[in-house]
Amino acid sequence: MSEAPVLLVTGGSRGIGAAICLLAARKGWRVAVNYASNRQAADAVVSTIEAGGGEAFAIKGDVGNADDIVAIFAAVDRRFDRLDGLANNAGIVDAPARVDEMSVARLERMMRINVTGSILCAAEAVRRMSSKHGGNGGAIVNISSMAAIIGSPSQYVDYAASKAAIDTFTIGLAREVATEGVRVNAIRPGVIDTEIHASGGLPDRARDMAPSIPMQRAGTADEIADAVLYLLSPEASYITGSILNVSGGR
Ligand code: NAP
């Protein structure tokens, strides 16, 4: 049986998550690729990993649904019977709006997917990794956003607030499980060139924002993946409760 470590990436079918999956496989992880609805994109990530000699499988599941989260982790258990890393990456934005224009339904969806989903996924990971539960340790990397610092006024303050919750959750969980072999860190990406901007109705956002970024360009999903894989690696063995800005100076 393979001894290679196992990484679950939520939202691994596209964008930053897909880049994390591909880099993880190149670094020797076996990868569970979660996706919400785009089976084709998830299968393409799995095929690319397999073509490179790696091992991966796709798992459909909505992190905004607690039952789906239980099923996602059960599928990882069945396939690999171990879990060493979680990239808590799945997340959404919504259309630009002022706070006084946001509906209850919008706010509940935003918090359910970005906050509750991430916390429930981390809890499932802790149940498998923590020495308190008989696990062998592991690492969790939460994907926050520079929005948590900037607040994203007139665009999506709800999203920014959801990511600020991820920052605080990262610090709290890291301290909670620090003696149990589990490290918990977060990345704050700046403006990264993925399809998330189109999903919020701003397809040109990455290009439009470039002049406001000190490095004068959007980042790439691969640049976020590099940071995530570092935090998951043994080279980061004394790093927990840290939140790393990967934002071109923004
Ligand atoms: P993206 O290109 O829109 O990709 C989103 C990924 O998440 C897809 O794989 C999608 O699956 C999956 N997903 C969406 N909703 C889900 C749900 N409810 N359950 C499970 N999976 C779900 O997004 P991205 O830009 O890579 O963003 C990834 C993370 O980085 C998010 O947390 C985002 O907030 C954060 N971030 C992004 C930026 C940026 O500028 N791009 C900046 C800061 C932070 P399907 O393929 O099935 O739809």
Image (cartoon, helix red, strand yellow):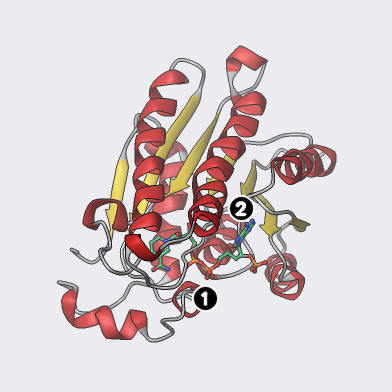
Q: Quadrant of the C terminus?
A: bottom left
Q: Is residue 35 above or below residue 88?
A: below
Q: Position of residue 30 (x, y in %)?
A: 68, 50
Q: Position of residue 125 (x, y in %)?
A: 62, 33
Residue at image coords 40%, 39%: 185
Pointer 1 or 2: first along the chain = 2
Q: How many marks?
A: 2
Q: Is residue 205 left or right of residue 114?
A: left
- Ligand 1 within 8 Å of disc 2? The answer is yes
11 and 114: which one is in front? 114
Q: Amino acid at mark 1?
A: Ser
203 and 141: which one is in front? 203
Q: Secondary structure at mark 1?
A: helix
Residue 174 figure quarter:
top left
The residue carrying mark 1 is 199
- Ligand 1 within 8 Å of disc 1? The answer is yes
49 and 184: which one is in front? 184
Q: Is residue 110 left or right of residue 52?
A: left
The residue carrying mark 2 is 10
